[in-house]
Image: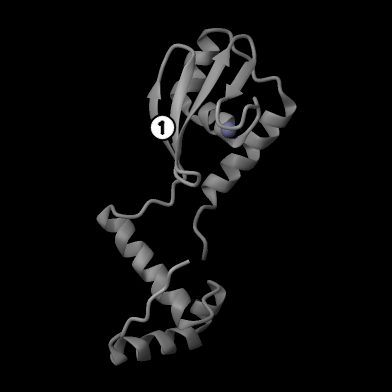
Amino acid sequence: MVSEKIRIDSNLLRSIDMYLESSLAKSKGFRNRRDVIEEAIRRFLENEGFWSTQRFKHINMYRDHVIIMDKLINRVVTVYFKPPNKTYCDACSTGDCEHVVYALTMSKVSKILKGKGFKIDNEQIENNLEEFMLKLSSRRIHT
Ligand SMILES: [Zn+2]
């Protein structure tokens, strides 16, 4: 990771140090100035619409496949569905990766698939689905 030294106002730094001494900071897992500064910047950028913690972005949906963007590997991924229960991801060449799980969690997709008689009977996908939903709901790092 590229990093750069930046000067920060001494009053701000003093407040950060005071905050770090508090039990509130400790309970949230903040240990040093960098923790606090990075979290503050992240929140600011998120508010301004310049930071997304979401790895996947739904791009388009077709009759038998879904196109999503994976920001982690920085590529467009296509997930195919073939009733009654076949799935396939072109990025991983498999039917039970996290892209498939993500595609299945998109409510619009699952509604359409159910309407076509698609069944999720792959145990691994079902387990992943649960894990994935859990991860989504506990996305924040310091809470
Ligand atoms: Zn995949």
Q: Position of residue 130 (x, y in %)?
A: 64, 37
The residue wearing badge 1 is: 58
Furthest residue to the front? Answer: 2
Q: Position of residue 123 (x, y in %)?
A: 74, 27
Furthest residue to the right? Answer: 123
Q: Position of residue 59 (x, y in %)?
A: 38, 30
How does the figure colour the protein chain or chains?
Answer: one colour
Mark 1 burial class by Cα count in 10 Å: few <14, some 14-19, many 20+? some
Compared with 40, 5 (above or below) is below
Residue 55 falls left or right of residue 52? right
Ligand 1 rendered quadrant: top right
Residue 130 falls left or right of residue 8? right
> Image point 38% across, 51% down: which residue?
52
Residue 13 falls left or right of residue 124? left
Under tag 1, what secondary structure?
strand
- Name the foreground residue: 75 vs 32: 75
- Name the foreground residue: 2 vs 47: 2
Compared with 75, 11 (above or below) is below
Circle 1: residue type? His
Residue 122 falls left or right of residue 41? right
> Image point 29% across, 57% down: which residue?
47
Compared with 7, 82 (above or below) is above
Furthest residue to the left? Answer: 48
> Image point 55% across, 31% down: which residue?
91
**Number of numbered labels in the structure image:** 1
